[in-house]
Amino acid sequence: MKIVAFNGSPRVEGNTEILLKEALRIIRDAGHEIILFNLNLMNIRPCQDCGGCDNTGQCIIDDDMTEVYDAIREGQRFILASPVFFFGLSAQAKTMIDRTQAFWCEKYLLKRPIPEGPYGRKGLLIVVGGMKKEIGIQCSEETAKAFFRTISVPVHETVSFLGVDSKGAILDVPDAFKKIEDAVKRLLL
Ligand SMILES: Cc1cc2nc3c(=O)[nH]c(=O)nc-3n(C[C@H](O)[C@H](O)[C@H](O)COP(=O)(O)O)c2cc1C
């Protein structure tokens, strides 16, 4: 299968990246193809609400989203990984998500959802928050759910960690990798 992964964290070797790398290691070992987008390194303009995609489902902005659109169409499994920033997903993740408004138009206005394909389409959300407040996870979950449904991913699972703040602190969470491993195995079913 083709697995499309989004790293929404700007922190190199931070908690999100550590968890995502572990997930991708398992996926690679299982022989699947991975397309990884490090959103912080990409040139993706925020949605301009210009209406350019309303009648076509095609965004008219020419930037790095073009390769994301292609990958979303071709992929069968999707991983969105992000830290909690101000009680929601990072700006890097949210900016990419807003640009999938083109898929929203295609699915809901033009009634052309992305076909399921032979393996179906499933998602995994990985979220890490420094605080111990659930609200950051809940807000991230709502946004991610809207994202997954928009790109015709009908089911997803969420793996979240609270109270993990300093760089690399996730390595001190005893069951973190086990949680990721279990979720990835279900993702690949
Ligand atoms: C701009 C900014 C905003 C943040 N806001 C929150 C927040 O609202 N809730 C929370 O739990 N943690 C918040 N944090 C802490 C991060 O979620 C935490 O440090 C996380 O481990 C970062 O993941 P990373 O290492 O993958 O970047 C914030 C951190 C930054 C830099």
Image (tube, grey):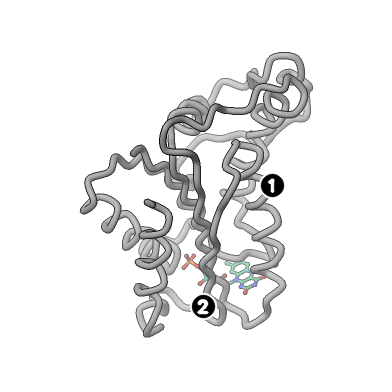
Q: Pick whichever, 152 or 83, lies toward us.
A: 152
- Residue at the disc numbered 1: 146
Question: Which mark is on residue 165?
Answer: 2
Residue 41's spot in the image, x, y percent?
A: 44, 43
Foreground: disc 2 or disc 1: 1
In this rendered view, identify the residue nearer to me: 83 or 126. Answer: 126
Left/right placement of residue 168 relative to residue 64 reads: left
Name above or below for residue 164 compared with residue 99.
below
Total tally of numbered discs in the picture: 2
Q: Is mark 2 within 8 Å of ligand 1?
A: yes
Could you say where residue 69 lies in the image, as x and y percent from the top left? Answer: 52, 28
Residue 128's spot in the image, x, y percent? 53, 69
User: Mark 2 packing: few (<14 Cα in 10 Å), some, or many (20+)?
Assistant: some
In the image shown, does 175 or 97 lie closer to the viewer?
175
Task: Report the side of 34 relative to 159 (left or right).
Answer: left
Q: Secondary structure at mark 1?
A: helix
Q: Quadrant of ligand 1?
A: bottom right
Secondary structure state at the residue bearing disc 2: loop
- In the image, is residue 177 above or below residue 186? below
Vertical comparison of 159 with 187: above or below: below
Query: Callout 1: 10 Å neighbours few (<14), some, many (20+)?
Result: some
Q: Would residue 96 appear left or right of 181 to someone viewing this image? A: right
Q: Residue at x 69, y 14 (%)?
A: 56
Please tell me which residue is depicted at 69% across the width and 28% down the height of the picture: 107
Residue 173 horizontal/vertical position (percent): 41, 83
State the separation of the CA atoms marked 2 and 1.
Answer: 26 Å
Query: Which quarter of the figure has residue 104?
Result: top right
Q: Residue at x 57, y 77 (%)?
A: 130
Residue at x 64%, y 44% (from the top left corner)? 147
